[in-house]
C-alpha cells in the first residue's frame, strides 16, 4: 500500500477508457522498411539509419517503438505508424528528405498493430485535449469529439520548431512521472506534478496547449489528473467544473483555464 494512494483496477480501467470508444478511427499500421544505400560514401551506415528514423519519429510519422534489425549487410526497420498515410513522402520533414539523398527505402505493409491505439479520422475536430499516461504510446493530442489521438505528422509544428520536440519531450517526461506515481514512489512529488496546475509539468503542458490553439484554431484543453475525490472547483481559478460535451472523452472542463479532468471515482 502506498503512503498517499492505492492503485486499484479502476485506475487502470479509467486510463484505458478511450480504447473502448467507438467512432471514426484509424488503426495503427505496422510496416517493414528495407534500406538500400545509394552510394558507398556513407561513413556510418547505422548512425545514418538511426538519425533517419529519429526524424520520422520527431515528425510524428512513426511511434517511438521502432526497431532496427541488421542481418549480414542488410538493414530492416519495423515501424508502427499512426495511419496508412503517415509514411507518404509528402508529409516528410526537410530533415527526413535530406537522408533520402543517401538511402532508398522500400515499404512492406505487415498488418495492423493492435497493441497500439487508434487515431482520429474526424474531418474537423471541434476541440482537443493534451493527454498522455504511462501506458500510452500514441499522439498526446486527443480529439475531443472521438477521443482518439491526432497523428502528429498532421499537426503544424509549434514554437518555431522543425519537429514536435516540445510535445514529444513533455509526453516522455509525463509518462515517466506517471510511472513513478503508479508505482507509488515519491508520491508527494509525482502527485503534485500531475495534479497541480502550477507544477512545472502542468505549466509546460499548458504552454503547449496555448501554442497548439494558435495552429489548430480550436480550444485545446490540458488534462489535469485529480486523484482521490472529485473536487467541485477548478484548482486554478476556483470556478465550478463544467460537464464536458463528450464525457466519453473527459468528464469535466474549465473553459476559462482550458483545463479538463475526469471524475476519479467513476
Ligand atoms: Zn476525432
Ligand atoms: Zn479554471
Image (tube, rainbow, N blue to C red):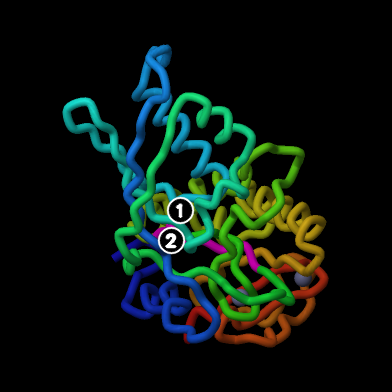
Give the quarter of the image for residue 128. bottom right
Residue placed under numbered mark 2 in the picture: 136
Count of numbered marks: 2
Q: Is residue 89 above or below residue 5?
A: above
- In the picture provided, is 199 more to the left or to the right than 149? right
* Mark 2 residue element: loop
Quadrant in which the N terminus appears: bottom left
Q: Quadrant of ligand 2?
A: bottom right
Q: Within the magenta stretch, is there residue 135?
A: yes
Question: In the image, is residue 102 above or below residue 222?
Answer: above
Neighbours of disc 2 within 10 Å: few (<14), some (14-19), many (20+): some
Residues at discs 1 and 2 in contact (Cβ within 8 Å) = yes
Which region is colored magenta? 129-137
Front one among 96 and 150: 96
Is disc 1 placed on a helix, strand or loop? helix
Give the mark toward the camera: 1 or 2. 2
Relative to 92, is 12 above or below? Answer: below
Quadrant in which residue 80 is drawn: bottom left
The crowd level at tag 1 (other Cα within 10 Å; few <14, some 14-19, many 20+) is some
Q: Could you tell me residue 158's position as x and y percent?
A: 73, 46
Distance, label 1 to label 2, CA atoms, is: 8 Å
Name the foreground residue: 131 vs 48.
48
- The residue sitting at 51% across, 58% down in the picture is 191
- Determine whether, in the image, residue 33 is placed left or right of residue 261: left
- Of the residues under marks 1 and 2, which one precedes in the sequence? 2
Residue that appears at 42% across and 24% down: 38
As drawn, 34 above or below 25: above
Residue of label 1: 175
Q: Is residue 159 magenta?
A: no
Q: Position of residue 160 (x, y in %)?
A: 76, 38
Is residue 90 visible in this depiction of the protein? yes
* Foreground residue among 96 and 202: 96
Amino acid at each position: 500500500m502506498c503512503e498517499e494512494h492505492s492503485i486499484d483496477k479502476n485506475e487502470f480501467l479509467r486510463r484505458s477508457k478511450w480504447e473502448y470508444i467507438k467512432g471514426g478511427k484509424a488503426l495503427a499500421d505496422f510496416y517493414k522498411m528495407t534500406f538500400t544505400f545509394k552510394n558507398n560514401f556513407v561513413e556510418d551506415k547505422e548512425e545514418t539509419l538511426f538519425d533517419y528514423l529519429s526524424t520520422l519519429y520527431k515528425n510524428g510519422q512513426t511511434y517511438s517503438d521502432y526497431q532496427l534489425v541488421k542481418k549480414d549487410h542488410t538493414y530492416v526497420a519495423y515501424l508502427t505508424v499512426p495511419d496508412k498515410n503517415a509514411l507518404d513522402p509528402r508529409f516528410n520533414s526537410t530533415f527526413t528528405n535530406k537522408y533520402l539523398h543517401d538511402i532508398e527505402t522500400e515499404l512492406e505493409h505487415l498488418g495492423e498493430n493492435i497493441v497500439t491505439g487508434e487515431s482520429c479520422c474526424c474531418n474537423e475536430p471541434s476541440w482537443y485535449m493534451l493527454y498522455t499516461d504511462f501506458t500510452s504510446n500514441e499522439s498526446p493530442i486527443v480529439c475531443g469529439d472521438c477521443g482518439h489521438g491526432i497523428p502528429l505528422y498532421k499537426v503544424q509544428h509549434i514554437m518555431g520548431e522543425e519537429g514536435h520536440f516540445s510535445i514529444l519531450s513533455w509526453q516522455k517526461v509525463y509518462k515517466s512521472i506517471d510511472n513513478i506515481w503508479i508505482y507509488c514512489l515519491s508520491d508527494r512529488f509525482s502527485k503534485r506534478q500531475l495534479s497541480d496546475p502550477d507544477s512545472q509539468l502542468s505549466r509546460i503542458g499548458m504552454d503547449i496547449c496555448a501554442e497548439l490553439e494558435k495552429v489548430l484554431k480550436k480550444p485545446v484543453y490540458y488534462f489535469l489528473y485529480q486523484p482521490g475525490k472529485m473536487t467541485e472547483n477548478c484548482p486554478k481559478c476556483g470556478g465550478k467544473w463544467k460537464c464536458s460535451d463528450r464525457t466519453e472523452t473527459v468528464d469535466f472542463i474549465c473553459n476559462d483555464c482550458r483545463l479538463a479532468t475526469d471524475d476519479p471515482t467513476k
